[in-house]
Image: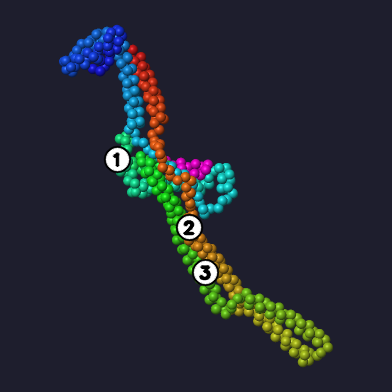
Amino acid sequence: MIKKLIQLFWFEKTKEEEHRTIRKSFARVKRHGMLGAIERLDKDYKQIDEDYITRSILNTKYAKFRLRFVFVTFFLLSCFYVVFLKTELYESRTALIVRDMSQTTNASSLGLSLLGMGSSSQLQDSKIVEEYLKSLDVYQLVDAKFQLTKHYKSDAIDFIDRLPNDATTEEVLEYYNKHLIIYYDETSGILSVAFAHVDPKKAQEILEFLVQNVDYQINEFNRKKAIKQLKFVEVEFDKAKEKMENSSSLLEAYQNKHLLLDPTAEATSSSGIIAELEARLTQKKIEYATKKSYLNEDNFELVNLRNEIKEIKASIAKTKSNLTGSEKNPLNKVLIEYEKLKMQLEFDTEVYKNALIQLETTKIDVAKNAKTLSIVSKPNLPDGYTYPNKPKTFITILIISLLMYGIFSMLSQIIKDHKE
C-alpha cells in the first residue's frame, strides 16, 4: 500500500496535477475504512499498472528510493543511538615507572638510556604489570570491592553494550579489559594505565585501587622468589656447615692419633736436626782424620772420636727413618695425609663462608623491596566523558553509510542491466 501511495504521488507529479493521492487516501480511510481505501487505491493504481513504461520508470525510482530510505534510516538510527543512548564513559589516567633498585647501572643500560630506550628489565617488569592488571585474579579483587559484574549487567550500560545476565566469566573479563587501557612507551619506559567507567569518581577510585595493588604485588613476586631461594640456600648452608664440622673432626682425630699438633712443623724440625747432625758428623770426621796422622789407632782421643762419629751416624739414620724410613707411620706419610685433611677443611670452611654470605644476602632480599613503583602522575578525576567520541563516530557512520549505499547501488544497477 505504501509503495502504491508513493508511486501514485510521483505519477501525479509527472503530470503536473495537484497532489491529491495522500489526501484522498486519508479521506477514504475515514469514509470506507482500511479495506475500502485499499480497494479504491488499487483502482487508481491500474492506470499505472497498465502503462508498462510508466510502471518501469516508477519501479526503478521506487527501488532507488527504498535503498536510500534504508541507508538514511540506518544513518539516523545510528546517530540517534550514539548521541542519545550510548553510554558515556569517563576515563581516569595515570602514568607509572617500574624500577629495579637491586640492579646497578651498567654500561649497557647506560647506553640504552642515552639512546632513549628503557632497560630490558624495566620492559619485562612493565609487561608483567600489564598482564597482572588484565588477569582474572585482579578483576576478582576489583569486582569484590566495586561490584563491576553487577554494574556491567545493569541499566547503567546501554542495551547494546550491556552484558547479558548469563554472561560467562570469560566474557566479563573481556569486557573489563575493554575498559582497561594499558600502553608501554619503550622510549621513556613509562607505563600508561587508564580505566573507563560511567561514573568519573568510580573510575578514579578503581584506578587508585589497581595502582596500590600493583605496588604491593610487584614486590610480592620478588619476595616469593626470594623465599624459595632462601629455602634452597638454607639447605645448602646446612650441608656446608655439616661438611666443615666433619672435616674439622677428622683433622682433630688425626692429630690426636699421631700426637701431633702440626706435622709440617715437626718435619721442618726433623730436617733441621738432620742438617745439624750431618754438619757435626763432617766436623768430627775432619777432626778424626787430622788426629789420625800423628796419633796411634788405639789412642783414647781417636777411639772417642770414632764412637762419637758412630753415634752421630746412628742418630742421623734414626731421624731419617722417622722422617721417610720404613717406620709404621713415617712422618712424610703423616704429613701428606695431614695436608689432605687440612686442605679439605680449608675448602669446606671457604664453602661455608660463601654459603653464610649468600644466606644473609638472601634474608635481606626477602625483607627489602627490590622493585619500586614510581607514580609519574596520579589517577585524575575526569571532568568530561572520553567515550564515545561523537563527532568522530558521526563522521565514521556517514562515511560507512555512503560507501555501503554506493556499493549496493552499483550492485543493483548491475543486476538490473543483466535482467534487461
Name the residue located 40 percent from the left edge and 44 percent from the top edge: 204
User: Which residue has dot 1 on it?
Assistant: 154
Q: Please state the horizontal and vertical placement of residue 76, each as a whole percent of the image.
A: 34, 26
Q: Is residue 135 visible?
A: no
The mark that comes first in sequence, 1 or 3, is 1
Q: Is residue 154 above or below residue 353?
A: above
Tell me where residue 10 sits by quadrant. top left
C-alpha span from label 3 to label 2:
31 Å
Identify the element where label 2 is drawn.
Answer: loop
Q: Nearer the viewer, mark 1 or mark 3?
A: 1
Q: How is the image coloured?
A: rainbow
Q: Which residues are magenta?
A: 179-192
Q: Quadrant of residue 175?
A: top left
Is 189 part of what is drawn in magenta?
yes
What residue would you read off at disc 2?
368
Q: Main secondary structure of the magenta part?
A: strand
Label 1 vs 2, first from the N-terminus: 1
Up/down of 195 relative to 362, above or below: above
**Residue 131 placement (x, y as % from top left):** 42, 45
Q: Residue furthest right?
A: 294
Residue at which label 3 appears: 244
